[in-house]
Image (cartoon, helix red, strand yellow):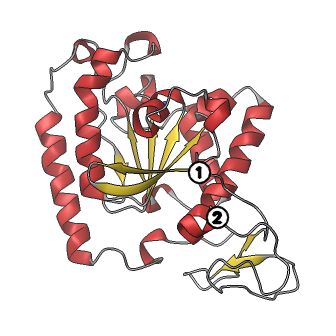
């Protein structure tokens, strides 16, 4: 699949806005380097701030750094990160198209779950990142990010692959929970679910909320999602690919429910 560069998708940020966001993220990162707001500072090698496009339209939020992330200072560089890279590639994106962060920025000892106190101490800085990056879609990876950003106690099984409109840090976003990639490393069924949900994510990025509320059937004049119907003989409609490649297929009748 050709890479669809999200930045070029709708000219949402000028180059000076991108530079401004990059600088704001750098200032925030510098301010957190010696953070001691919670006990996680005691066991870390370094704080893992986040990485990617400063004005990415798609933000991924995981749980917290693991062993390799703690060593390298970069999110999702271990096995789960490899799978995340593959999932991104599968929908025509690279890590430099998106931004990747975590609920907590320092590694919990032995990769235990972050505690509510640790999340409360760290999450304001994730919110600051969101205010700077201004993502259109926030894809939460696993239950901690989902609970925090979708504000739900529902299980991942209940909410994965569904979208919820949410204002986060003053930014109108669509929160889209998926399983954490670590949950799919040794469970092929979860991996299939992730691949399926990433395909939905691609459609959400291409078509925004219109992808969530298409008419029930596709008879007659297209799918009613804004007149972008193509007739390439495939029976699918697709959104224009900003990199000039073929249209990305979108099944005509699928619904991505809001919950
Ligand atoms: N798992 C996470 O949740 N975050 C990382 O950065 C790496 C693994």
Secondary structure type for disc 1: loop
Report how far apart the C-alphas of labels 2 and 1 lie in the structure: 9 Å
68 lies left or right of 201: left
Quadrant of the frame with the C terminus: top right
Q: Are marks 2 and 1 in contact (CB under 8 Å)?
A: yes
Where residue 183 appears, x then y in whole percent?
64, 27
Count the marks: how many? 2
Work out whether mark 2 precedes mark 1 in sequence or the reverse, and give the earlier one.
Answer: 2
98 lies left or right of 189: left
Secondary structure type for disc 2: loop
Q: Is residue 25 visible?
A: yes
Q: Is mark 2 within 8 Å of ligand 1?
A: no
Residue pictured at 46% horizontal, 39% vertical: 150
The residue that mark 2 highlights is 213
Where residue 24 appears, x then y in whole percent?
16, 55
Q: Is mark 1 within 8 Å of ligand 1?
A: no
């Amino acid at each position: 699949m050709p890479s669809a560069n999200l930045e070029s998708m709708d000219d949402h940020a000028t180059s000076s806005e991108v530079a401004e966001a990059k600088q704001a993220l750098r200032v925030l990162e510098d301010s957190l380097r010696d953070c001691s707001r919670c006990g996680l500072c005691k066991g870390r090698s370094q704080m893992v701030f986040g990485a990617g496009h400063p004005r990415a339209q798609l933000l991924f939020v995981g749980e917290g750094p693991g062993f390799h992330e703690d060593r390298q200072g970069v999110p999702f560089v271990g096995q789960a990160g490899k799978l995340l890279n593959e999932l991104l590639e599968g929908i025509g994106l690279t890590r430099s198209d998106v931004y990747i962060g975590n609920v907590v920025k320092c590694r919990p000892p032995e990769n235990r779950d972050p505690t509510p106190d640790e999340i409360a101490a760290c999450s304001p800085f994730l919110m600051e990142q969101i205010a700077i990056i201004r993502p259109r879609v926030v894809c939460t990876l696993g239950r901690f990010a989902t609970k925090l950003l979708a504000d739900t106690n529902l299980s991942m099984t209940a909410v994965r692959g569904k979208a919820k409109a949410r204002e986060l840090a003053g930014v109108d976003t669509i929160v889209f929970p998926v399983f954490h990639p670590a949950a799919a490393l040794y469970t092929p069924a979860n991996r299939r679910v992730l691949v399926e949900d990433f395909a939905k994510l691609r459609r959400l990025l291409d078509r925004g909320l219109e992808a969530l509320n298409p008419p029930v059937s596709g008879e007659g004049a297209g799918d009613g999602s804004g007149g972008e119907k193509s007739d390439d003989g495939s029976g699918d409609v697709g959104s224009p690919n900003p990199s000039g490649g073929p249209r990305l297929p979108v099944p005509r009748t699928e619904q991505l429910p809001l919950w």
